[in-house]
């Protein structure tokens, strides 16, 4: 398959994923508002922190999922279909084991932590227990889904995600409706309904895989030849997953211990916003990642570098385009979105989005390093840096600083952590120019961000808060960002192809 056909496939898959994202984001923002108002700030915080305990243990699955995706895509890129079948079965066997480990950890250490350490009102502890147990079951089911999802991504069938997200969105709306009219304990009922949706969606995904991908027919075998490199890869990646969780769910639990469930509600809102915004680049990157692995498998390093540079710039631009107005108008937007805005939600949202700007630039670099399979050097270093977020936050909380301080710490550590990707890239693939990456990617992103922020900031500080200012900020930010992105983010070749496509469409329309 030539370079042009690969680009068309990436564009097609990105469009499918963007359709999925727009629908998902709209429904997610609406349902979050209704759920928050129906449950109340305290119960919303309980759901966030109780479910977060079991998510802490899912770092085992996160590392193995990354290994599964990499090895399945690599074998597909090499055209080794017999080994592809064995790799899938080996991966699913390991995921069954991980699900069992999660059950043991959840019913011992996790349950003790829930009962003895979390700050939850006594009258809501029984509901928290139900949420926790249902979260364990949901997590175990989701873990065994990872090899099937990795298979779909490896085959670049992104359209199935779009179709399934339509169903998922309707089911979420159904959850909201049932939650509002229900006479049951709303927190417990909410957790039970989410579990039902998880089971239904995963069942459909598996049926699709079994019908379309022969390698997804599971056959138990303990193949050491396949499992050893996969477990070695995931073993090092385990450190990265653990450190990432220390920055997310670890901080969430720390916030509960020091400040209570109301601050957990604010954290939950901030992560909802980040999740919605991250889909703008995440969907694009999901379409790009398989191609990066396949280019490496085919030893096409120049094409892989070209794709990495463009993916990094576009990833940042897509995040910046949607999130910049959200950052500067965050207070007004949250008031429009939520009837009850938890304290600290505004600064949490702003700082978590700023951190994501940095991550967006360097994620494609991480994909390239993962494609090589040589992740030991990168993972050990970056894990050491990222895991510092937790002890440093604990110290500043002990000293009496506000909850916002942990997000400032996270922003600083994220910046230094991302530099490790560049260092590891230079060690693994020295033929990729690091100087050119900073010059053609990082510097360009900084210039685009600065140029695009001047006019919106002027409007923000010269007008009173309200609909008028919000509309002017969105329009001015969009126009200036698109102009800057067109001339600085897109290469000359990409601009030429874009113009030719527009001109051709205009001719066809006439």
Image (cartoon, rainbow, N blue to C red):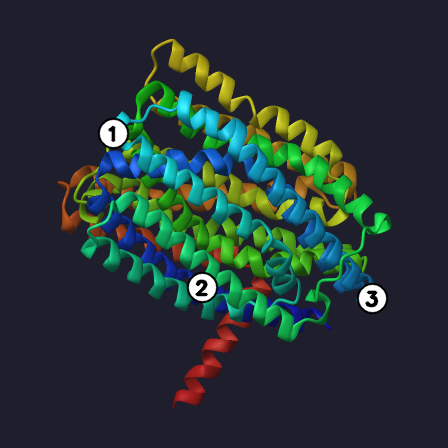
Instruction: Report how many numbered discs are placed on residues in the image.
Output: 3
Please say if 488 is above or below 37. Answer: below
Separation of disc 1 and disc 3 at Cα?
Answer: 56 Å
Identify the residue at horizontal 58%, vertical 71% (top origin). 208
Q: Which of 395 and 260 is in front in this view?
A: 260
Element under disc 1:
helix
Gap between marks 3 and 2 measured at Cα:
33 Å
Q: Which quadrant would the N terminus be assigned to in this image?
A: bottom right
Q: CB under 8 Å between callouts 1 and 3? A: no
Which numbered mark, 1 or 3, is in the foreground of this view? 1
| Residue in front for this viewpoint, 283 or 328 | 283
In this image, 206 relative to 296: left or right? Answer: left
- Give the numbered dot on residue 123: 1
Residue 56 screen position, x and y as percent: 51, 34
Identify which residue is drawn at 51% across, 17% down. 391
Which residue is at the far top?
399
Residue 82: mark in rendering = 3
**Above/below status of 488 relative to 10:** above
> In terms of sequence position, does the residue under pointer 3 or pointer 2 come before the other?
2
Element type where label 2 sits in the image: helix
Which quadrant is home to the C terminus? bottom left
As rendered, which of 500 and 154 lies closer to the eye? 154
Local crowd size for mark 2, using a 10 Å CA cut-off: few (<14), some (14–19), many (≥20)? some
- Label 3 neighbourhood size at 10 Å, few (<14), some (14-19), many (20+)? few
- Locate residue 294 relative to residue 226 in the image: left or right: left
Please say whether residue 350 is visible from this viewpoint.
Answer: no
Q: Position of residue 217 (x, y in %)?
A: 70, 67
**Residue where numbered disc 2 is placed:** 18
Q: Earlier in the sequence, mark 1 or mark 2?
A: 2
């Amino acid at each position: 398959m030539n370079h042009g056909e690969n680009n068309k496939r990436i564009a097609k898959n990105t469009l499918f994923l963007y359709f999925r994202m727009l629908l998902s984001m709209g429904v997610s923002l609406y349902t979050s508002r209704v759920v928050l108002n129906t449950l109340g700030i305290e119960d919303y915080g309980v759901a966030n922190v109780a479910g977060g305990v079991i998510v802490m243990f899912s770092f085992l699955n996160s590392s193995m999922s990354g290994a599964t995706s990499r090895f399945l895509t690599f074998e597909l890129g090499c055209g080794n279909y017999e080994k592809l079948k064995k790799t899938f079965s080996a991966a699913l066997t390991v995921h069954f084991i991980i699900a069992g480990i999660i059950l043991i950890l959840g019913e011992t250490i996790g349950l003790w932590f829930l009962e003895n350490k979390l700050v939850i009102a006594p009258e809501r502890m029984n509901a928290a227990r139900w949420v926790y147990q249902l979260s364990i079951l949901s997590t175990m089911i989701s873990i065994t889904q990872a090899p099937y999802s990795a298979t779909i991504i490896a085959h670049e069938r992104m359209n199935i995600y779009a179709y399934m997200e339509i169903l998922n969105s309707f089911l979420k709306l159904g959850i909201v409706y049932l939650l509002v009219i229900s006479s049951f304990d709303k927190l417990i009922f909410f957790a039970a309904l989410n579990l039902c949706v998880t089971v239904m969606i995963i069942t459909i995904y598996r049926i699709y895989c079994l019908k379309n991908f022969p390698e997804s027919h599971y056959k138990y075998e303990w193949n050491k030849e396949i499992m050893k490199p996969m477990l070695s890869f995931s073993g090092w990646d385990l450190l990265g997953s653990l450190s990432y969780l220390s920055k997310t769910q670890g901080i969430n639990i720390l916030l509960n211990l020091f400040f209570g469930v109301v601050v957990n509600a604010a954290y939950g809102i901030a992560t909802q916003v980040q999740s919605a915004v991250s889909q703008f680049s995440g969907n694009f990157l999901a379409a790009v990642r398989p191609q990066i692995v396949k280019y490496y498998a085919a030893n096409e390093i120049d094409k892989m570098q070209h794709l990495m540079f463009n993916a990094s710039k576009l990833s940042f631009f897509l995040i910046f385009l949607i999130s910049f107005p959200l950052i500067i108008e965050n207070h007004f937007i949250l008031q429009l979105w939520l009837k009850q805005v938890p304290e600290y939600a505004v600064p949490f949202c702003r700082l978590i989005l700023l951190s994501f700007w940095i991550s967006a630039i360097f994620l494609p670099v991480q994909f390239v390093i993962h494609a090589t399979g040589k992740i030991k050097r990168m993972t050990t270093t970056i894990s050491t840096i990222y895991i510092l977020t937790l002890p440093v936050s604990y110290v500043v909380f002990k000293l009496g600083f506000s909850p916002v301080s942990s997000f400032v710490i996270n922003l600083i550590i994220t910046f230094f952590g991302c530099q490790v990707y560049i260092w590891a890239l230079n060690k693994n693939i020295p033929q990729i120019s690091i100087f050119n990456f900073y010059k053609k990617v990082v510097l360009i992103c900084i210039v685009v961000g600065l140029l695009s922020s001047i006019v919106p900031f002027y409007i923000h500080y010269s007008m009173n808060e309200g609909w008028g200012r919000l509309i002017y900020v969105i329009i001015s930010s969009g126009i200036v960002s698109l102009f800057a992105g067109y001339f600085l983010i897109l290469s000359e070749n990409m601009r030429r192809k874009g113009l030719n496509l527009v001109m051709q469409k205009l001719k066809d329309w006439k």
